[in-house]
Image (tube, helix red, strand yellow):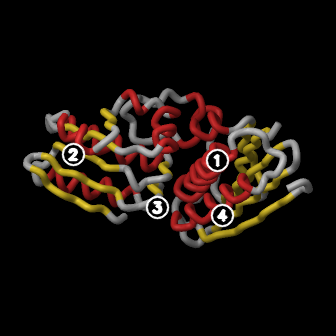
C-alpha cells in the first residue's frame, strides 16, 4: 500500500495513496501504524481523500489503529472521506466510533 | 441489457484479484439499461459484496491456500442479479455469523453482515466438494 507519512509536531499525518482499501492491502496500513505506535507516535490523522473504495478489511485496519492509539492515550482521526467511503462507515455504524473531519486542517485543529 | 447475461470467472485463491472482480461487478451495474434505481450506488454495492464474498472464500473457507481456486458467477436478468461465489472449504454457519453481535471496536466480523445488508437474499449451500455463497439483488 502506498502511504505518504508526514510528521507535524506530535501528530503524524498518513495519506493513503490508493484507490482501494481491501483485504489485499489493509494489512500494510495496520503494520505501519503499529510501527509508529512502537516509536511512541500515537496521534494519527488518516487522510482518505484518494480512497474510493473500502471494505470490511480496510475498516478493520482503521479500527485496529484506533484501538491501539486509544490504548496509548493517543488518538486516530479520519479526514476527507469520499461519499461512498463514508456510506460504508454509516452502514457499519463506525461513524459513531471515529472522529471524522471534512478537511485535514479541521482534523489538525481538533488536537 | 435486455437479455440474460452471465459472466463466469475463475481466479487463483489470492486477494490480488479482488479489485479486478469488483470492477467487473461495477461494469455490469452500469450496463443495466432498465434499472431505475441509483446506478452508481448499485455498482458500488456490487463491488463491496463481491469483495466481501471473495475475501471470505479466499481467507476463511479456502484458508489462504494458494493451490485452491475461487469461481465467481454473476448472472443478470430483467428481474434480478445473482452472484455465486464457490469455495473449496469445509463451510461455516452463515446464519450464526449474520446474527453475531459485532462489538463496535471489533476488528473483524463485519463482512458477512455487510453482504446481508446490501443484498435481498443470501444463502450458503453445499456444492460438490465445497460450498457456494448465493446472493440475489432484486432490480425492480
Q: Which circle, 3 or 4, is nearer the viewer?
A: 3
Q: Quick check: marks 4 and 1 in contact, CB under 8 Å?
A: no
User: What kind of element bears circle 1?
Assistant: helix
The residue under the point 40% across, 31% down is: A95
- Residue marked by disc 2: A44
Q: Position of residue B140 (x, y in %)?
A: 82, 36
**Chain for mark 4?**
B
Could you confirm whether marks 4 and 1 are on the same chain? yes
> Residue A24 shows which numbered tag?
3
Q: With A4 as the anchor, is B79 left or right in this view?
A: right
**Of callouts 3 and 2, which one flags the residue occurring earlier in the amino acid sequence?**
3
- Residue marked by disc 4: B70
Q: Quadrant of the N terminus of chain B?
A: bottom right
Crowd tier of the residue under label 2, counting other residues whose Cα lies within 10 Å: few below 14, some 14–19, many 20 or above: many
Q: Is residue A53 above or below residue A106?
A: below
Could you confirm whether marks 2 and 4 are on the same chain? no
Q: Which circle, 3 or 2, is nearer the viewer?
A: 2
Q: Which circle, 2 or 4, is nearer the viewer?
A: 2
**Of callouts 4 and 1, which one flags the residue occurring earlier in the amino acid sequence?**
1
Q: With A55 as the anchor, is B43 left or right in this view?
A: right
Q: Quick check: marks 3 and 4 in contact, CB under 8 Å?
A: no
Amino acid at each position: 500500500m502506498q502511504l505518504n507519512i508526514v510528521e507535524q509536531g506530535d501528530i503524524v499525518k498518513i495519506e493513503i495513496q490508493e484507490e482501494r482499501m481491501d483485504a489485499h492491502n489493509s494489512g500494510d496500513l495496520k503494520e505501519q501504524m503499529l510501527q509508529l505506535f512502537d516509536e511512541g507516535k500515537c496521534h494519527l490523522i488518516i487522510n482518505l481523500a484518494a480512497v474510493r473504495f473500502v471494505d470490511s478489511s480496510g475498516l478493520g485496519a482503521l479500527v485496529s489503529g484506533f484501538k491501539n492509539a486509544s490504548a496509548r492515550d493517543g488518538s486516530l482521526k479520519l479526514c476527507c472521506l469520499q461519499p461512498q467511503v463514508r456510506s460504508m462507515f454509516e452502514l457499519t455504524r463506525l461513524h459513531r466510533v471515529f472522529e471524522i473531519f471534512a478537511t485535514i486542517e479541521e482534523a489538525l485543529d481538533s488536537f | 441489457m435486455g437479455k440474460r447475461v452471465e459472466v463466469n470467472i475463475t481466479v487463483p485463491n489470492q486477494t490480488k484479484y479482488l479489485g479486478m472482480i469488483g470492477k467487473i461487478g461495477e461494469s455490469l451495474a452500469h450496463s443495466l439499461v432498465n434499472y431505475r434505481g441509483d446506478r452508481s450506488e448499485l455498482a458500488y454495492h456490487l463491488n463491496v459484496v463481491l469483495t466481501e464474498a471473495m475475501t471470505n472464500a479466499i481467507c476463511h473457507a479456502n484458508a489462504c491456500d494458494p493451490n485452491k481456486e475461487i469461481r465467481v458467477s454473476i448472472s443478470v436478468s430483467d428481474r434480478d442479479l445473482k452472484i455465486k461465489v464457490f469455495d473449496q472449504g469445509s463451510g461455516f454457519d452463515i446464519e450464526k455469523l449474520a446474527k453475531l453481535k459485532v462489538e463496535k471496536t471489533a476488528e473483524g466480523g463485519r463482512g458477512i453482515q455487510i453482504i446481508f445488508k446490501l443484498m435481498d437474499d443470501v444463502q450458503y449451500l453445499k456444492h460438490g466438494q465445497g460450498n457456494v455463497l448465493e446472493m440475489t439483488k432484486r432490480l425492480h
